[in-house]
Image (cartoon, rainbow, N blue to C red):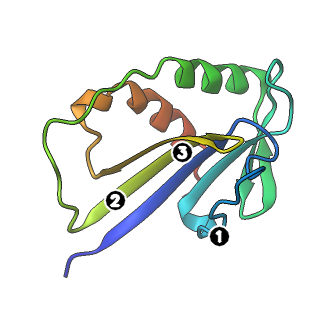
Amino acid sequence: MAILTFRHIIVDLVGDPYFPIQRQTNYPAYSTLHFVNRGSAAKPEFELHQGEQPAYRLSPEENAKLLRLMQGITVSAPQMPMLPLDGMATDLSIRQHGCDLSFRWHCELPAEWDSLGELVAFVTSFQKE
């Protein structure tokens, strides 16, 4: 039997990314890595949330690395379409006041999106087994 599972990675660049547009927020906590900036754009202070509750505050070095990895993203359209049947599908969203940059892939990150690989590896390192 094929089993398709999802991992949601959300990086909110502002403390209230839902203003002025409401977004889905009820992803299961066990499959979601939700980073929320509780600082400012000039001095970010990201928290990792489990559901609606903060679970971990990133260190200044971790904040800097997260921002650096997001700033290094360069992508183009994938060449090969994929039909997900089983395995892990991943959603990555970077959000700020009604603007989203979102990616979704199944199992393997498309080669054209390699610059996301280090960002995904970094944020998933915070996931508890």
Residue at numbered disc 1:
26
Direction from residue 38 to residue 12 in the image, left or right: left
| Res 38 → quadrant | top right
Q: Residue at x 62, y 64 (%)?
A: 24
Q: Are marks 3 and 1 in contact (CB under 8 Å)?
A: no
What quarter of the picture does the N terminus occupy?
bottom left
Residue drawn at 73 percent across, 53 percent down: 49
**Image disc number at residue 114:** none
The residue beneath circle 3 is: 93
Residue topped by disc 2: 88
In contact (CB < 8 Å): disc 3 and disc 2: no
Q: Position of residue 105 (x, y in %)?
A: 32, 49
Give the residue type at disc 2.
Met
Image: 65 above or below 104: above
How far apart in space, not on screen, are marks 3 and 2 (Cα)? 16 Å
Residue 36, given in percent of the width and then of the height, sits at: 74, 43
Q: CA distance from mark 2 to mark 1?
A: 19 Å
The crowding category of the residue bearing disc 1, from other C-alpha atoms within 10 Å (few below 14, some 14 to 19, many at least 20), is few
